[in-house]
Amino acid sequence: MSLLTIGINHNTASVELREKVAFSPDKMSDALQQLQSMPVVSGSVILSTCNRTELYVDVDAQASSDIVDWLIDFHQVDDSDLKPSIYTHSDELAIQHLMRVSCGLDSLVLGEPQILGQVKQAYADAKEHEAVQGNLDKLFQKAFSVAKRVRTETDIGGNAVSVAYAACTLAKHIFESLDRSRVLLVGAGETIELVAKHLSDNGCTQMTVANRTKERAAGLASQFDAQVVSLSEIPTALAQADIVISSTASPLPIIGKGMVESALKSRRHKPILFIDIAVPRDIESEVSELSDAYLYTVDDLQSIIDQNIEQRRAEAVQAEKIIGIESKEFQSWLRSRKAVESIRDYRRVSHTIRQDLLAKSLQALNTGGDPEKVLLELSNKLTNKLIHTPTKALQEAAEKGELDDLAVLRKSLGLEDL
């Protein structure tokens, strides 16, 4: 059997094609059952995310085309569309690929941690359907331990590389502790939701959400025990806020210089940090002219993100070294497994020969045969049977001039020092 990875990702396929080949949760059970029913497949795991669809299978060595054909047939896509986007890795490269994916080294955002949870879920789904076992099972367990080691020994995921996370990191740097900071979030979309999550994870408990519709804001606020205000109530809310983070789809600024000026007077000029991550801007650029207002835009955050990406790339070098070491260790384990299988087969064949000759010898004794002659015949026949195949292999290696093979055979038969 051979370990094989077949898939497409954000580097090889368009969003449209990735959507066509994605496995929805309601199709996963049927897909795993179909894969496992193929005679060439002994184990399978399906990883399907917005950025990749990958099949990890333990298959006959020449079965990759069968798996690709199954993928095409299952999703009813045109092979001329899918095949150019597919990559295939086998054995050593398949091992390294899964480790790189699990560590976030093959992600759209380098080092992102969510992919490990998605790989673990794919493995759990396969386990539930009894689709993963043996070498494939061991490979996934190894990949999880490698991902843990990479997270422990490198800082691959330690720097902000999303706008939402960068905004939270900036606030945390300016305010040493967020547990006493009051935050006004303007907007209730996905970006603000991520900001709120990062703030909450860092100890922030005093959040207010301002949005055009209070109903939408209430849904977000309920997750973080936050207060809700309308956009018209922002001037009052500003006076209570230490940090303001805004991300709406408004075509015009929501927070102006005069509004901020009034809020600062109410606060007796206690500073406010403004982080505007909207495009177009939610906060007038003139706000930065006020002495107690500190305004950062999405461009400022992008420079932070760019620096952090470079830091992640440096950490990725160390992560790749770890994967190189761990993948070689796993390959050694696989080779040792093959030796175990060979030893088991060799013992089984030898045992069969012994049992067969012993039965004939016992039969000869039971019919009155001379015990000495029976034993002599048994020992001769057993010796000849056991040395026949090794003798033939030695002869063929010598005749073909295969000196390396001949040396290995002599060593395995205990003839090296003779």
Image (cartoon, helix red, strand yellow):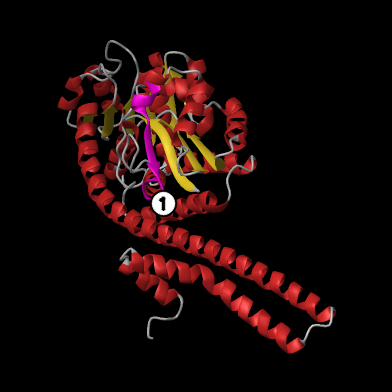
Q: Position of residue 385 (x, y in %)?
A: 59, 72
* Side (left or right) of 215 relative to 363: left
In the image, residue 377 above or below residue 67: below
Q: Secondary structure at mark 1?
A: helix
Q: Position of residue 264 (x, y in %)?
A: 27, 28
The residue sitting at the left extreme is 289
Q: Position of residue 361 (x, y in %)?
A: 74, 77
The magenta segment is: 81-95
Q: Mark 1 — residue?
A: 147
Give, as a three-letter code, the residue at label 1. Answer: Ala
Pick the quarter of the image with the C terminus: bottom left
- Residue 32 location, quadrant: top right
Q: Position of residue 6 (x, y in %)?
A: 42, 36
* Side (left or right) of 342 relative to 33: left
* Side (left or right) of 91 relative to 172: right
The residue sitting at the bottom extreme is 372
What secondary structure is the stretch in magenta mostly built from? helix
Residue beneath the point at 34% across and 25% down: 84
